Amino acid sequence: MKQQSEPALAISQLSKTYEDGFQALKSVDLEVAPGDFFALLGPNGAGKSTTIGIICSLVRKTTGSIKVFGHDIDQDFSTAKQFVGVVPQEFNFNQFEKPIDILINQAGYYGIPSDVAYERAEKYLKQLALWDKRNTASRTLSGGMKRRLMIARALIHQPKLLVLDEPTAGVDIELRRSMWEFLKEINRQGTTIILTTHYLEEAESLCRNIAIIDHGQIVKNTSIRELLKQLNKETFVLDIREVLDSCPQVEGYPLSLVDEHSLEVVIDKSQSVNKLFTALTEKGIHVLSMRNKTNRLEELFFDLVEKNLQESNHE
Amino acid sequence: MNNRQKWISFSTIVRREIHRFLRIWPQTLVPPIITIVLYFVIFGRLIGSRIGEMSELPYIQFVAPGLIMMSVITNSYSNVVSSFYGSKFQRNIEELLVSPTPNWIILLGYVVGGMSRGLGVGAMVTLLSLYFADFSLHSLPITIGIVLMTSLMFSLAGLINAIFASSFDDISIIPTFVLTPLIYLGGVFYSIDMLGDFWGSVSLINPILYMVNAFRYGMVGITDINIAWSFIMVGLFSVVLFGVALRLLETGSRLRS
């Protein structure tokens, strides 16, 4: 079976130059293994949506090739498209149609008979808590419901590769968590998932592998675990019991005062946090709690993007 | 996609298109009926009775086939142009573009949807016309053949208009400034014999003249032009428009960035 031995997605030398001359992608190479939960991160305008657009054939590539489970999207487009499900960033369904009709029609475009389509629509609408809204005009759904409707629509033909372009943008934290659980479950069942997101916490908790794209180029492509190993420094915020009028000084630990009950400290990977606690205790300062100032991945992401920007400016 | 899957995809598009114009029937079905009834009352009964005969027929019998054809043309065109552009505007055309449905099936699906409305409204107008005029059908094959080909041709034209349109203004420009004048000057209300040699010859470049005359011949047995030419003209136009529409879909012009 071709699709079992082939990568879920193989992008080779992919470039895209828009009609106005803007070069969105510059010879991108990328591979995603079958069954992976993969994050594609990058700042706005980095090329994430262009890459996704080309994978699902809404954007025409300039050069390069894309294979989905070994099927070229140009030469074997019908099979390749059967394998891909896409959840775009913007709502792109008919706002005047009912959710059940949107799903049944989408199944029809993939050649799925209506009885099978109805069964699947019921399954996914129930799993995504939309079954009660199946006969409501979709324009009346909330933003979170619309996002879930697009996920159900992308799954209706049971794709092996699901591509999600910022699926939780604008979704409240409770709903976001339930969507994470749903995505983890379908990934456990064997669906390869590629996710773009601005919530780096989302990428860290869901994905195993990651690519960071910036200015149309992949600047990092590794596992989340490997990437986090590169994090040499972390910034912590310490909540203090006492009222502080000035910032205490501890040798080797650059402390700064955030407010009268909290301190900020940058700690190198080689340093001991215990030593800092001991030194503070000796000064009569008791630490009540400690937390990361930002998400760990976020710090690395900014480092990489900043480094890439400096290199671009230097060139 | 195998043939069964292609058929499911095609029938899904057609069913969705028919469902769309039936769902908004006060916008899609009622206005053309009211318009045509007004034409029958004003041009047929009120003014028509004073005009007398045209091409040896009572005026209302002369004008009725043209009015039926006018409703088929405008409804076939406007259904496809508004539905396809609406899908582009809301971006739900992407549902089809990301699917494995071949472009020729997308094209046929929209065209058959447009023909369904055009022919449906045409059938209703024909039934209404029986209240105003008496007909003895001259040739059923010619009547059916020309009305099917005309509906096909204008559905294709509507799709091309929708692909090029980038605003709602763009989908009303062609119907207002091209289609309506061509229909009014296409022999719906008069015989081109009345125009004299020069303007009669100029009228021959209007494709709607051929459709209206062929349809009139099928219904009442009179025509200003050669029927074979009518079929050849409409057939040629349809083939060219089909080729252009398919090419636009294949290249993704104005649909894929």
Image: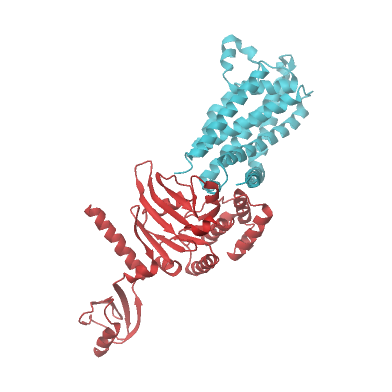
Chain colours: A red, B cyan
Q: Nearer the viewer, residue A266 or A29?
A: A29
When the figure is inspected, residue B145 is found, relative to residue A116, above or below; the finding is above
Residue drawn at (37%, 64%), measured in percent from left and top? A222
Quadrant of the rendered structure where residue B41 is? top right
Front-most of A246 and B140? Answer: B140
> Residue A133 placed where, x, y %?
62, 60
User: How many numbered circles are shown?
Assistant: 0
In the image, is residue B86 above or below residue B160?
A: below
Residue A19 lies in quadrant: top left
Q: Residue A175: image x %, image y %?
A: 51, 67
Judge left or right: residue A313 versus residue A196. Answer: left
- At horizontal 60% and vertical 10% (from top left) the residue drawn is B196
Q: Residue at x 64, y 61 (%)?
A: A122
Q: Is B34 placed left or right of A93 in the picture?
A: right
Residue A57 image offset from top left, x and y in percent: 48, 47
- Residue closest to the eye, A221 or A148: A221
Residue at the farthest top position: B197
The image quadrant where one finds the C terminus of chain B is: top left
> Where is residue B153, by image quadrant?
top right
Judge whether residue B197 can be spotted in this image: yes
**Does residue B234 appear to the left or right of A256 in the view shown?**
right
Residue B188, visible in the rendered structure: no
As drawn, A259 above or below A312? below
Q: Position of residue B10 (x, y in %)?
A: 63, 43
Query: Which residue is at 64% across, 21% downward?
Result: B230
